[in-house]
Image: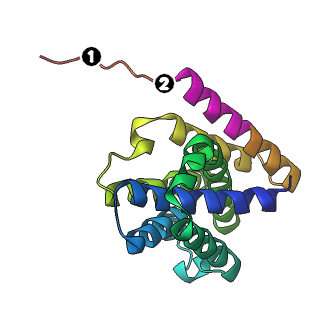
Amino acid sequence: MSWTVLHIIGIMAYAASGALVAIETKYSFIGVFVLGLTTSFGGAVVRNLIIEAPLSNLWDSKTSAVVFITLTLIVLLPVKWMQHWKKWGLFFDSIGLATFALQGALLARFAHEHFGFVLLSAMFTGVGGGMIRDLLARKQPLALKEEIHTVLTILCGLCVCLDWTQPLQLTLIVFVIVTLRMLAIKFHWKIRLCYPLKK
C-alpha cells in the first residue's frame, strides 16, 4: 500500500472520528461537519502558524473533497453502521495519527530544516485537530490522557529528521506507528512519571 493511499485513509479516518464524536455528543449535522473539519484541519492550522506557512495552503482541492465526501456519507448512513467504526475506528485513527504527523514533519523540514520545528510540527499536526475536537465536544482531550499519542508523533518527527522520507520508508513508518499504538491500546501501556507529593 502506497504512502498516498495511506494518507488518504488517514484523512478519512480523522474526518470520521470528528464526525462520530459529534454524533455521540448529539450535535446536529452542522456539528458533524464542524467537528469533522476541525479534526482534519485543526492540527494543520496550528502547524502552519508555527512554521509560518500560509493557511491558504491547507485548502487543496483533493484533501477538501475527501473530507467533505467522508462527512456527507457519515451524515447519510444509518446510525447502526456506526458500530463498524467502533470496531475499526482506532485502527484507522492510528493511520491518521501517523500520516498527519509525518506530513507535518515533512512540511516543517522543507520550510525550516530545524530539529525543534520538525518535532513540534509533527506533534501538533498529529494530535492538534483531535484536541480541538474534544474541547468542542466538552471532553477531556484524549491526547492529554494517553501519552502514547504524543510520543508516537515525536517518533515520526525523529524519523523525518533522520531523512527517512522516501515513500517506501514513510509507508514502513506508518505501519510501525500503527502497530505500536494498537499494542499500547491492547496492553494498556502507559508512561508514568513519579513526582514526589508535597504536603
Residue 173: name its quadrant: top right
Mark in front: 2 vs 1: 2
Image point (38%, 69%), residue name: 31
Give me the disc on residue 190: 2
Task: Report the span colored magenta.
Answer: 176-191
In the image, taking residue 77 as reference, residue 161 lies left or right, namely right
Q: In the picture, which quadrant includes the C terminus?
A: top left
Predominant SS along the magenta part: helix
Give me the disc on residue 196: 1
SS at badge 2: loop
Q: Tell me residue 7's x, y (percent).
A: 72, 59
Of 67 and 106, which appears nearest the observer? 67
First in sequence: mark 2 vs mark 1: 2
SS at badge 1: loop
Image point (58%, 28%), residue name: 184
Q: Tell me residue 196's x, y (percent).
A: 26, 16
| Type of amino acid under label 2 | Lys
Residue 184 lies in the magenta-colored region: yes
Of 169 and 27, which appears nearest the observer? 27
Residue 104 visible: no
